[in-house]
Amino acid sequence: MEKGILYGVSVGPGDPELLTLKAVHAIQEADVIAVPNIGHGRQTALSIAAEYIEGKPQIECSTPMTRDAEVRHAAYAENARVISELLDAGKNVAYLCLGDIGVYASFAPVNELVRAAGYDVHIIPGVTSFSASAARLGIVLCEGSERLLVSPVMSGNVDEILDVPANKVFMKSGKAVAELRDKLAERGELEHASMVANCGLPDEKVFPHFADIEDDTDYFSVVIVKENV
């Protein structure tokens, strides 16, 4: 029996109209839909692509948000095992991921494990959350010789990132967003920053002025800090 193909499908940041035609075709042609589950009960990627799934069988792929590397590895290994069994049965699997699948996505370790086991994997790029957020704010991310630095808020030292001469994008801000706001205020850079939470989703919130944010902010928050304004 010919083995199936695993498709890593980017579904964009939230607005279903930002799905690419290639992503739609992969979802429609797949036999099984794999849905990442980070444990908070909200399956955003699934809801974005719902129109094209048409009752296909689904599997949940646990993607625990923990610093425990062993727990993460065990979850990804189990996801790869389940997906591999489907591929062995000749099923094509579409693994859905928010934004672009190549940017801080849960698909990366699954991709590596499945590829290493000898299966065919196709990756379909998509619209990033920060591209969509910049468009929603009516700004450009970078132009001319400007550089762009993209980082999750929780990684490394925020001061070290802010010291780099570049326009910055902070992803997955969540609970750290208020701390980032205060840090920018200390450095006199707050007026150069803006934020979008849940871009393209029904509960989207847009803050052209980062100083106006609410302390209780969703995990899917993108902060853009312009170096030269």
Image: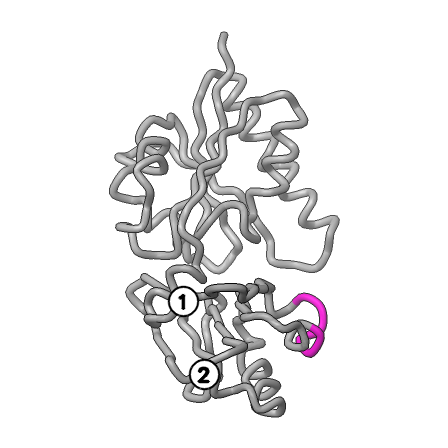
Residue 228 image position (x, y, % from top left): 51, 78
The residue lying at 71 percent from left, 74 percent from top is 160
Q: Magenta stretch?
A: 155-160
Residue kind at label 1, given as amino acid type? Val
Which badge, 2 or 1, comes first in the chain's sequence? 1
Residue kind at label 2, given as amino acid type? Phe
Which of the 4 image quarters holds residue 207?
A: bottom left
Q: Nearer the viewer, residue 204 or 149?
A: 149
Q: Is residue 177 part of the magenta span, yes or no?
A: no
Which disc number belongs to residue 210? 2
Q: How is the image coloured?
A: one colour
Q: Is residue 170 above or below residue 77?
A: below
Q: Nearer the viewer, residue 173 or 46?
A: 173
The residue lying at 35 percent from left, 56 percent from top is 14
Query: Could you classify mark 2 by the number of other residues whose Cα lies within 10 Å: few (under 14), some (14-19), or many (20 or more)?
Result: many
Front of the two marks 2 and 1: 1
Residue 45 image position (x, y, % from top left): 40, 49
